[in-house]
């Protein structure tokens, strides 16, 4: 039974909205953070009843309080993300405990999928700088991914490892290593694949059959090039509108959705259109609505 007393709120297109599209972030000095109720009210008005969980602290830490808030706005959480250090053997226990706690909360609020990003370090104030691992560190990362699969199974969640620019796993070579060395599913984020210099369609073909979750977004290619060559920081690029409404950037989202359909993907899509607000008076619904106008017909 889900958080709505057995009555599932159903997204016709399996399309969810992410709080990041309203400027919500756990990054230090990201910008003004809107009240959760304002974001949920907007999402309920323009979406199809489904959201992702947002960063820790966006929704109440107590799952019963979170469920009550979601019920008030007739929303369901379909997935949530956790960032963890997976390649350091000395902190395996604390990192697994961190993931387990998040998985327990996600399951309690009715989510289906845990999206896992393998971060180089815990420093939310730093730009995304990436990392290069030794063979031993890769072995430990892959072993820990297997442990996270068991954690997710215990909480009745699917695991989707996200290749993310500036994280440990970001380009096709890293993704292939994950596919060969584990049985984990993947979360594909179109913009982050472009930022890493990959062709999203080629990655979709590489990961066919393992895709568990998809982040839909679009990017300004000139800014993406500058982020990739480190001449512009990621946070500053987002401030300059790195993420564009879907169909107004260069990520070729239409082509990617067609490729996903060709692989037989039937999972959730989430609008993950990161933004930074200048003030709490900003209205991010304009870009969100333009993305919805473009993408919803593609999912029909």
Image (tube, grey):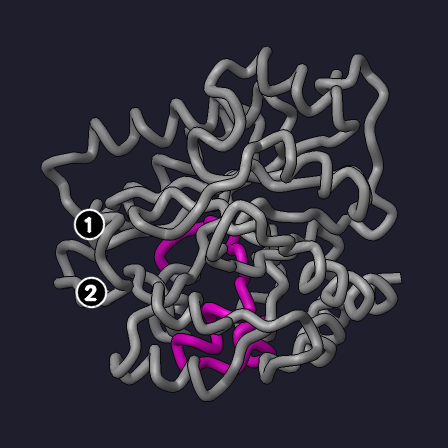
**Residue in the picture at 72% in, 71% down:** 257
What residue range appears in magenta?
A: 181-204
- Tell me where residue 20 appears, x and y as whole percent: 53, 50
- Give the alpha-carbon distance from disc 2 to disc 1, as whole Å: 9 Å
Relative to 98, does residue 121 appear above or below in the rendering? below
The residue that disc 2 covers is 131
Q: Nearer the viewer, residue 126 or 197?
A: 126
Can you name the residue that lies furthest to the left here? 90
The C terminus is located in which quarter?
Answer: bottom right
* Displayed quadrant of residue 43: top right
First reached walking from the N terminus: tag 2 or tag 1? 1
Residue 121 shows which numbered tag?
Answer: 1
**Residue in the picture at 37% in, 67% down:** 165
Give left or right: position of 254 versus 112: right
Q: Nearer the viewer, residue 21 or 99?
A: 21
* Displayed quadrant of residue 147: top left
Indicate yes or no whether the magenta region holds residue 154: no
- Tell me where residue 79 appears, x and y as whole percent: 59, 39
Indicate yes or no whether the magenta region holds residue 191: yes
Element under label 1?
A: loop
Give left or right: position of 129 versus 36: left
Q: Nearer the viewer, residue 283 or 168?
A: 283
**Residue in the picture at 39% in, 72% down:** 237
Element under label 2?
A: loop
**Residue in the picture at 46% in, 19% down:** 61
**Do the residues under discs 2 and 1 have CB atoms within 8 angstroms?**
yes
- Tell me where residue 214 appears, x and y as whole percent: 61, 57
Residue 140 shows which numbered tag?
Answer: none
């Amino acid at each position: 039974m889900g958080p709505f007393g057995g009555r599932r709120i159903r997204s016709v297109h399996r399309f969810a909205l992410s709080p990041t599209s309203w400027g919500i972030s756990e990054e230090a000095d990201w910008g003004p953070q809107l009240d959760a109720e304002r974001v949920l009210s907007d999402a309920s008005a323009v979406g199809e009843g489904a959201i992702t969980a947002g960063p820790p602290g966006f929704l109440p830490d107590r799952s019963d309080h979170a469920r009550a808030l979601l019920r008030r706005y007739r929303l369901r959480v379909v997935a949530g993300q956790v960032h963890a250090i997976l390649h350091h053997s000395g902190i395996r226990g604390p990192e697994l405990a961190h993931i387990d706690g998040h998985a327990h909360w996600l399951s309690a609020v009715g989510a289906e999928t845990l999206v896992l990003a393998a971060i180089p370090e815990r420093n939310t104030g730093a730009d995304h700088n990436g990392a290069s691992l030794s063979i031993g560190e890769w072995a430990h990362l892959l072993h820990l991914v297997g442990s996270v699969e068991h954690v997710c199974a215990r909480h009745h969640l699917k695991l989707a490892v996200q290749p993310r620019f500036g994280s440990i796993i970001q380009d096709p070579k890293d993704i292939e290593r994950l596919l060969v060395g584990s049985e984990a599913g993947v979360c594909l984020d179109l913009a982050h694949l472009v930022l890493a210099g990959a062709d999203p369609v080629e990655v979709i073909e590489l990961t066919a059959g393992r895709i568990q979750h998809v982040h839909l977004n679009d990017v300004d290619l000139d800014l993406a090039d500058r982020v990739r060559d480190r001449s512009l920081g990621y946070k500053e690029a987002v401030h300059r509108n790195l993420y564009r409404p879907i169909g107004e950037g260069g990520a070729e989202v239409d082509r990617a959705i067609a490729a996903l359909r060709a692989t037989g993907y039937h999972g959730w899509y989430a609008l993950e259109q990161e933004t930074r607000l200048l003030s709490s008076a900003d209205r991010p619904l304009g870009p969100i609505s333009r993305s919805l106008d473009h993408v919803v017909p593609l999912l029909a």
